[in-house]
Amino acid sequence: MSLSAAVLLAAGPSPSPSPSQSSTPAVPSFKDAQESASNAAGWVEENWSTWLAIGLRVLLIVAIAAVLRVVVRRAITKLVDRMNRRAGTGASTALSSLLVNAERRRQRSEAIGSVLRSVASFLILGTAALMVLGTFQINLAPLLASAGVAGVAIGFGARNLVTDFLSGVFMILEDQYGVGDSIDAGVASGEVIEVGLRVTKLRGDNGEIWYVRNGEVKRIGNLSQGWSTAGVDVTVRSDEDLEKVKETIAAVGERMSKEEPWNEMLWGPIEVLGLDSVLLDSMVVRVSAKTMPGKSLTVERELRWRVKRAFDAAGIPIVGRSEVPGQEAAAPDPTAGMAAPSAYSSTVSPQSVAASPIPPPSTTK
């Protein structure tokens, strides 16, 4: 018998587990439950002060951020309202001198206030969120580094979008144009129907809508701010009486400035500036008037209409008319459009004989 077999016989048979013990799990005793509860209570008792400090700190950060946001938004609103009232009382500022109505000032004030309030809310709430994360012992260095890298990537990928946004912000802050203005943006022109931070909508002369990106606008010509100038060139014959022409145009301008609605559109008298050019058979008289913004074309059309009727009544001829009063037009020459006969039309003419081909020599004998 080997040594290992002797050891096994001395130890005796190994106990086998009962079927009931192998099939059902062990039920914890009351002592085990009491011990677990004691451990949990001890852990809570050790950490409740830390939790309370973190909770109070987060609550304090949120409360301060909420109060600061409300205070800043109200301050911005009061500042914008004060600027609006100051512009409405006629204060001599660079921007208020360009604005002509209260509605325009109200729209601009609301746009500026909305942008400033949005920026302030973003900064305050973003800073509060970072402080809350720092309270929970979260390392912000990787987060800020990732945000910086992501911001640079987004900036390079969406640089046109960033350019459009910044251009829109400065257009609103500088009050370059507003809803209802007629502008020339270079790439398109028309009446502004919507001003956004990225895109400006224009209504063209034919009713089309142009969507102009703010970043694409290099220069703006606003035809609706301040005042406009209506200019009309009156062309008469070079031998016409200038005093008679001037008196006729002055009478037209005086009557027009006293009639409605032209007396509201005209912001100054209609002036005859003088001769703009003198040619051999004609001369151009320049007429100008200061008008309401955006009404220069309307005033020019009406002024041309009235000047034409006044000239016809005064007997002042129009340059370029086919007939001059008192003279009959000469009958046109019917042969003026006919070409001269060609020398090659006759087969016996020397030119035709010289140009005829030489017959080949005869090969027959």
Image (cartoon, rainbow, N blue to C red):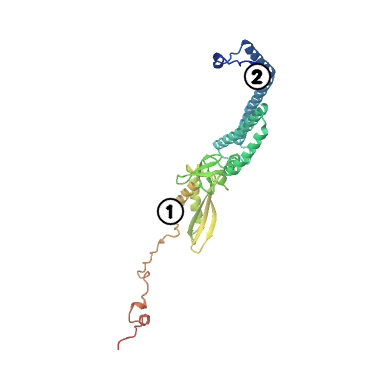
First-in-chain label (2 vs 1): 2
Return the residue found at the far top.
30
Q: Secondary structure at mark 1?
A: helix
Question: Of residues 220 and 32, which is closer to you in this image?
Answer: 32
- x then y, percent, for residue 290: 54, 47
Q: Cα distance, mark 2 to mark 1? A: 149 Å
- x then y, percent, for residue 22: 56, 16
- Residue 133 in the figure: left or right of residue 290: right
- x then y, percent, for residue 342: 36, 76
Question: Of residues 201 and 39, which is closer to you in this image?
Answer: 39
- Image disc number at residue 6: 2
> Which residue is painted at 43% across and 52% down in the image?
309
Q: Relative to 292, is 309 above or below?
A: below
How many marks are shown on the rendered structure?
Answer: 2
- Image disc number at residue 313: 1
Label 1 CA crowd tier, 10 Å (few <14, some 14–19, many 20+): few
- Residue 43 in the figure: left or right of residue 327: right
- Image disc number at residue 164: none
Question: Of residues 23 and 70, which is closer to you in this image?
Answer: 23
Return the residue found at the far front.
1
Q: Relative to 48, is 199 above or below?
A: below
Question: Of residues 183 and 300, which is closer to you in this image?
Answer: 183
The three-letter code of the residue at mark 1 reads Ala
The three-letter code of the residue at mark 2 reads Ala
- Residue 298 in the figure: left or right of residue 91: left
- x then y, percent, for residue 100: 56, 40
